[in-house]
Amino acid sequence: MADAPAAFEDRADKSLLIVDDDRPFSTRLARAMEGRGYQVRVAESVADGIAAIENEPPAFAVIDMRLGDGNGLDVIERLKNRRPEARGVILTGYGNIATAVTAVKMGAFDYLAKPADADEIHAALMAQPGERALPPENPMSADRVRWEHIQRVYELCGRNVSETARRLNMHRRTLQRILAKRAPR
């Protein structure tokens, strides 16, 4: 296979752009990816991500789907226009089949649901076309995924229990009981 991508260690350009408005997440991910040999730049908005790509298109990108000023698909589309061989991965907390298909059609190499860790992201960036990712060694339980989703919506609603319950189509008291419990394993 002459057209197979070179192994990461053999690549001259190891530039990585992370576009995510969740600063603690992007900071942790940047550190973890630097430890794997990437030269990392971070942008926190669609506008900053596009500006970074216009300035110097990276070889790799990890882009959040929903950003404060727009959609991460605009960033992946610009990346593919400026550097067609670049490998971009879309991250989202709102995974569904329609957005995954759209992301891949617009040039994303893979699509991962949050919370994704650095190992999963690195594996997605290095995967051969058509190669399936290995299942996680220690995946979150369904209860933990549910709890994480509720916590995310709760934070997005400004920690307003009534608004969160309305958006989750859940009784307010039920939500209060869930929020009072420890996170499941």
Image (cartoon, helix red, strand yellow):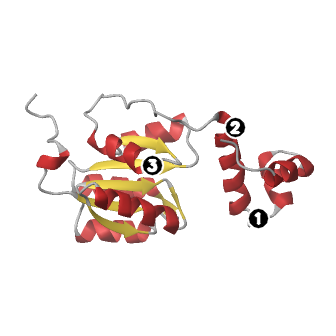
The relative height of residue 17 versus residue 11 in the rendered view (above or below) is: below
Label 3, on which residue?
117
Name the element at disc 1. loop
Q: Quadrant of residue 127?
A: top left
Label 1, on which residue?
159
What is the C-alpha distance between the residues marked 3 and 1? Answer: 25 Å
Label 3 vs 1, first from the N-terminus: 3
Task: Tally the marks.
Answer: 3
The type of residue carrying mark 3 is Asp
Counting other residues with Cα less than 10 Å from the Cα at mark 1, is it few (<14), some (14-19), or many (20 or more)? few
Mark carried by residue 143: 2
Foreground: disc 1 or disc 2: 2
Viewer-proximal residue among 132 and 74: 132
Q: Residue drawn 28% across and 52% down?
A: 80
Q: Do the residues labelled 1 and 2 touch (CB within 8 Å)?
A: no
Foreground: disc 3 or disc 1: 3
Q: Is residue 13 visible?
A: yes
